Image (cartoon, helix red, strand yellow):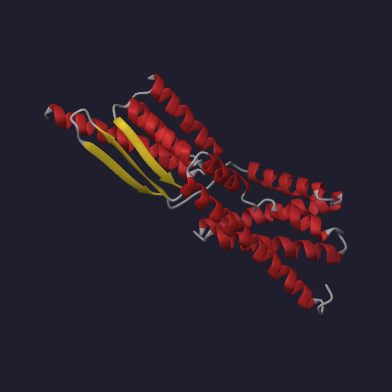
């Protein structure tokens, strides 16, 4: 194999590994500028020249040159997104190790396979987290301790429902709508049965589990960083998610009003 072919193969490998790292960042809910920085750093460290990329929440394009003057490019589509901060942290560490020379190409490939295979947090951490978050916000918004306990139970069930709907590849909009409807219905039922008193605090505390807070923060950070397309796209995604929650809660409240004869 000639030297130009060797160079081309080496740059192709650099581009492949760097874009895999960027893909993992975007699929894990990371910012677009972070994905671009990771891709550029890894590709440059592995021999790619003039590495550059353009990322959005739903896909990105990346390119770099080889020493013979050839240009190489990759386009990747991001079809799934699920928040996983551990993956983002480990990709950041991998990029730093690559730039410093502590990882070679084989080591990077092994690390990427291990990071990509990481799943969600093991039980009972998601259950405990859902209960803590919903119960805490119920107290924060004026609920009593019995209201917080009911909200915690609702939060655990919402976590299971949304995880199940997510495994069915249902869109986040419908998952949030179902979760919001269940939160309002369960809170109103608890108040009707007399085991809790502040249904408003319970509803607000429960739906806080569904609110796209990280997505909103990332949208603002992308806009501040100058990535206007990515920031506006993330903002629209957050708005649609919030709309799903509102629709679900509103439908549950309207149904309760109709069942009570229009007096609720």
Q: Position of 202 compared to 234: left or right? A: right
> Does the rendering let one see residue 153?
no
Instruction: Looking at this view, name the residue that lies furthest to the bottom.
Output: 261
Q: Position of 41 compared to 255: left or right? A: left
Q: Quadrant of residue 84?
A: top right
Q: Is residue 95 above or below residue 54?
A: above
Q: Quadrant of residue 96?
A: top left
Image spot of residue 258 (x, y percent): 77, 77
Q: Is residue 58 above or below residue 180?
A: above
Q: Position of 201 compared to 15: left or right? A: right
Residue at the spot 82% in from the left edge and 80% down from the top edge? 261
> Which corner quadrant holds the C terminus?
bottom right
Q: How many numbered discs sit on the rendered protein?
A: 0
Image spot of residue 151 (x, y percent): 76, 53
In depth, the one of 144 and 226 nearer the eye is 226
> Which corner quadrant holds the N terminus?
top left
Residue at the spot 78% in from the left edge and 74% down from the top edge? 257
Image spot of residue 160 (x, y percent): 63, 54
> Does the rendering let one see residue 160?
yes
Image spot of residue 169 (x, y percent): 49, 59
Q: Position of 234 compared to 182: left or right? A: left
In depth, the one of 258 and 215 nearer the eye is 215
Residue at the spot 42% in from the left edge and 37% down from the top edge? 36
Residue at the spot 43% in from the left edge and 23% down from the top edge? 97
């Amino acid at each position: 194999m000639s030297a130009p072919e060797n160079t081309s193969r080496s740059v192709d490998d650099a581009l492949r590994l760097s874009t895999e790292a960027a893909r993992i960042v975007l699929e894990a809910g990371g910012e677009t500028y972070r994905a671009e920085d990771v891709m550029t750093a890894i590709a440059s460290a592995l021999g790619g020249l003039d590495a550059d990329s353009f990322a959005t929440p739903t896909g990105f394009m990346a390119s770099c040159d080889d020493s013979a003057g050839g240009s190489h490019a990759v386009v990747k589509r991001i079809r799934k997104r699920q928040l996983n901060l551990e993956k983002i942290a480990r990709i950041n560490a991998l990029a730093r190790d690559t730039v410093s020379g502590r990882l070679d190409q084989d080591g990077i490939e092994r690390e990427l396979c291990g990071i990509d295979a990481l799943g969600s947090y093991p039980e009972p951490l998601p259950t405990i987290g859902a209960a803590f978050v919903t119960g805490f916000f119920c107290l924060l918004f004026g609920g009593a301790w019995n209201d917080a306990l009911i909200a915690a139970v609702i939060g655990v069930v919402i976590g299971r429902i949304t995880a199940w709907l997510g495994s069915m590849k249902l869109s986040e909009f419908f998952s949030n709508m179902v979760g919001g409807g269940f939160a309002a219905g369960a809170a109103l039922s608890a108040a009707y049965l007399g085991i809790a008193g502040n249904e408003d605090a319970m509803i607000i505390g429960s739906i806080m589990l569904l609110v796209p807070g990280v997505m909103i923060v990332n949208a603002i950070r992308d806009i501040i960083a100058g990535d206007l397309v990515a920031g506006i796209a993330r903002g629209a995604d957050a708005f649609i998610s919030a709309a799903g929650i509102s629709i679900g809660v509103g439908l549950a409240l309207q149904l309760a009003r109709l069942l009570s004869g229009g007096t609720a």
